Image (spheres, helix red, strand yellow):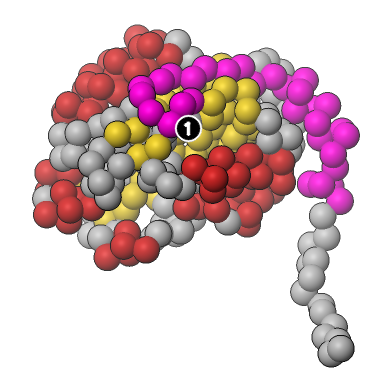
Amino acid sequence: MPLPAQPLTVAAVQAEPVPGDVAGNARAAARLVGRAAARVVVLPELFLPAYHPPTLGADPAGTDVAADPDGRVDDPRLDPLRAAARDTGAAVVIGAAVRHPDRRRTISALVVDPAGAVTAAYDKQQLWTGERELFDAGRRGATLVVDRWRLGLGICYDGCFPEHGRAAAADGAHGYLCPGGYLTGSAHRRDLYYAARALDNTMFVVFANPVGGADPWRFNGGAAVYDPEGRPLARGADTGEEVLAATLDPTVLADTRAAHTMLLDRLPDAGSARATFVA
């Protein structure tokens, strides 16, 4: 897959949404997009309704947005976010709870394009513990293309599975965008998984995460952008709202992939044939 010709400015956001307030959280997201001044802005998992299972379970009608059979979302509560994308020329990736025509309910990444169109672009495939009681798993991967940059989409627990990031890389991804929802006490795993996906696949990773909330749903920030060797180009604190911008450089991508050729060297069936020894 050809490398992009030009750098790409991205932003990872950490902020505190209000449980159940889709309209208010869309306004907050619009403000953060304006602050980012980036071509791609990534906000946390389920940012629009907030990651708060009691509210998500009690009020699905109020917390969900509806998608049509083509994945298009037309919800007036998102109008400020549409306007922010149009005004800034940004592609916005933001977490939502989505109701599909076939009655599936998913944790999804919405993409708001610079024309203001909203699409439910990706549904989370790897559901975490209690999410399975409220949501259905996604059925396919997805790649977002912005200025010839191929950006695989994942959501939180997806990024804990090496196969998920590798599938994006196998599809030609130069980067991997992961809205997350990591709770206080998980900082070690939060900081390890997404750096590892960058290094595993020699691709940039953009990770967004909420902050704040009340126990047991208190979130720990740490939003970050990682280079293709897993080093942070930008990283947020564990608390407080932040918009973390970084530039993805195609020269860095090319140099890293020339020096570290895992994507070319990987065996298609590594480990499938095994011997067992007893000592």
Classify residue 227 as left or right of residue 19.
Answer: right
Residue 33 screen position, x and y as percent: 37, 17
Classify residue 133 as left or right of residue 4.
Answer: left
Classify residue 88 as left or right of residue 97.
Answer: right
Residue 14 screen position, x and y as percent: 39, 28
Q: Amino acid at mark 1?
A: Gly
On-image quarter of the N terminus: top right
Above or below — where is 221 with respect to 67?
above
Residue 105 screen position, x and y as percent: 27, 56
Q: Nearer the viewer, residue 276 or 60?
A: 276
Q: Nearer the viewer, residue 1 or 94?
A: 94
Residue 22 screen position, x and y as percent: 18, 34
Above or below — where is 158 with respect to 260?
below
Q: Is residue 255 magenta-colored? A: yes
* Residue ID for mark 1: 222
Q: Is residue 170 magenta-colored? A: no
The residue sitting at 35% across, 40% down in the picture is 219
Q: Which residues are magenta?
A: 236-265
The residue sitting at 24% across, 26% down in the picture is 26
